[in-house]
Amino acid sequence: MKKDKGAGGMSVFLIDTEGESYEAKIEKGEKIGFKDAKRLARLLVGEQHESISELSEHTIFHTQKLRGDFALTTKLDAGQLELFIKASRIYKSIEDELKSILDSTGELVTIVNNQGVVERVSSNCKQIMGIEAADFVGNSIFELERTGVVSLSSTKRVLETHREVTVTQVTKGGRRLYVNGFPLFNDNGTLEKILNISRDVTEESILRERLKKTEREVELLSQEVNKGFENSKIIMKSVQIEEIYYLLSRIAKTDATVLFLGETGVGKGVFARHLHNISERRKAPFINVNCSVLPEHLIESELFGYVKGSFTGASTQGKKGLIEAAHNGTLFLDEIGELPLQTQAKLLQVLQDKSFMPIGKTSAIKVDIRIIAATNQNLEEMVEKGQFRSDLYYRLNVVPITIPPLRERREDVPFFLQHFLDAFNANYKRSCRFTMEAIEQLSHYDWPGNVRELQNMVERLVITSPKQSIDFEDLPIPLKRGEASDERADLPDDSLKVRLDSYEKEILLDTLKKTKKLHEMSQILKIDASTISRKLKKHHLNLQ
């Protein structure tokens, strides 16, 4: 480059990307045929900046002052400029950061231009939308909506309203999305881009439906609250049950916590209902909660209730818990051993302070209730294993009452048979009766399922018996096989328990020869696996 001595003014050299250069003279600018050089030369005059950049419709010019009166101007068209920018380290760094932001949210993020064309999408596009990102980017959102890739376009609504919108979409793959669309404006207030953030709520929708179904089922169960309980009659013939009956009469005058213990089917719920019915709380609700049937993720909301908006899927009106529903009455917690440890801690507060805090509420609610619990598990062993809170166990174990199994009070069997026979005869309009031989056989049966098994057996016989008289031959085969030998039947009363234990051990040993698996033993013996486990420990037997 050299200064034009005749010009007496500033020289400007314009160098374009093709390598051609042009010279412009300020005082003779009107004679210059190259318009861009003329215009840029005029721009440079009087400027104090060291460099000037100006963008025309499709071209950018950058003018840099050099020594003396020289300046260098570089011309780039828009396409070339874009390539240079994308090749720069700063652009790549920004590109990587933007991609990381899009992918780190865990949601589907899309950026759409003001023509409705998708420019960017997060990497989880295929997982949520069901199509590859390459097939999504570059497409018009109107075409995607027309072909059913999305059911309702948030971008379309933002373009129409220029406002933030929220829509629910269903993708072609059946995913349900909760979409927020945000308009992005430039400095001139013109809509430049649309940012869409889509949250996949498919699983939440399924859980919400399940929650509603479960709540309906719980409501049906709760309808028993103020009803009478026709089958709550206690059959008293054995000395053990007579003693329990009179003990309950004394306890009923207090609000002491009672813990009923015993095998499955012995009638713990019947005794709990009877205690409520003879107490001062008999006119108030009796809430029966089976802790083993409530799903773990719902048990707290069912027991303690919740306020509206406490969690996704919660009722908009909130929900009163079963503890609050038992106010002034009795709360019966059956199968208390199945209660999760976290819920045990909250129940402890109810026992200690007679108060609780619903989910989402910041203040406690006072309640006046009596708590009765029941279990067929060994809570002491569960405490030792860390499966049950010791402080809760001691709070519940104020008055422990063990209900003996039916095999230990065989004298009650004939009375249970007659009680259920009368009930089912009336229900099914039959006139069935048991012969003495049948009653004798049933009295010698061990009844592993206890009263519940006996009740079900009587109902089945009343329904299926072709004649009114139910004899030994009409009994189910397992009950026939349980026939006691004459030798065992003639044993003195004081040795019956010892002989029964011995016979029980023989049965277990015989079953262990067939299988060493607990669930298979349960199927063979027709009793709960937990009952078999306890009996194995009782007789010092193991599965190995």
Image (tube, grey):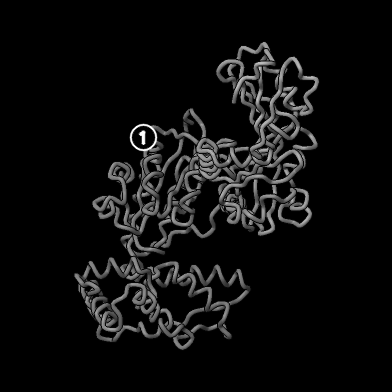
Q: Where is residue 393 in the image (x, y as percent from the top left)?
A: 30, 46
The relative height of residue 513 versus residue 122 in the rendered view (above or below) is below
Tell me which residue sits at (19%, 70%) in the image: 540
- 137 or 312, which is in the foreground? 137
Q: Quadrant of residue 500?
A: bottom left
Q: Residue furthest bottom?
A: 473
Quadrant holding the N terminus: top right
Q: Which residue lies furthest to the front in this view?
A: 6
Relative to 24, 259 lies left or right? left
Q: Where in the figure is residue 251, as x and y percent of width and height?
A: 36, 44
- Amino acid, disc 1: Gln
Q: Could you say where residue 244 lies in the image, as x and y percent from the top left?
A: 34, 54
Quarter of the rendering occupied by the C terminus: bottom left
Residue at point 44%, 86% (across, down): 472
Which residue corresponds to the image point at 75% horizontal and 49% vertical from the top-left?
140
| Residue linked to disc 1 | 352
In depth, the one of 272 and 308 nearer the eye is: 308
Q: Is residue 335 above or below residue 258?
A: below
Residue 285 can be seen, yes or no: no
| Residue drawn at the location 67% of the way across and 11% of the way down | 46
The number of discs equals 1
> Looking at the rendering, which quadrant does residue 408 occupy?
bottom left
Question: Does the image show residue 451?
Answer: yes
Instruction: Compare residues 310 and 435 and report the one nearer the observer.
Output: 310
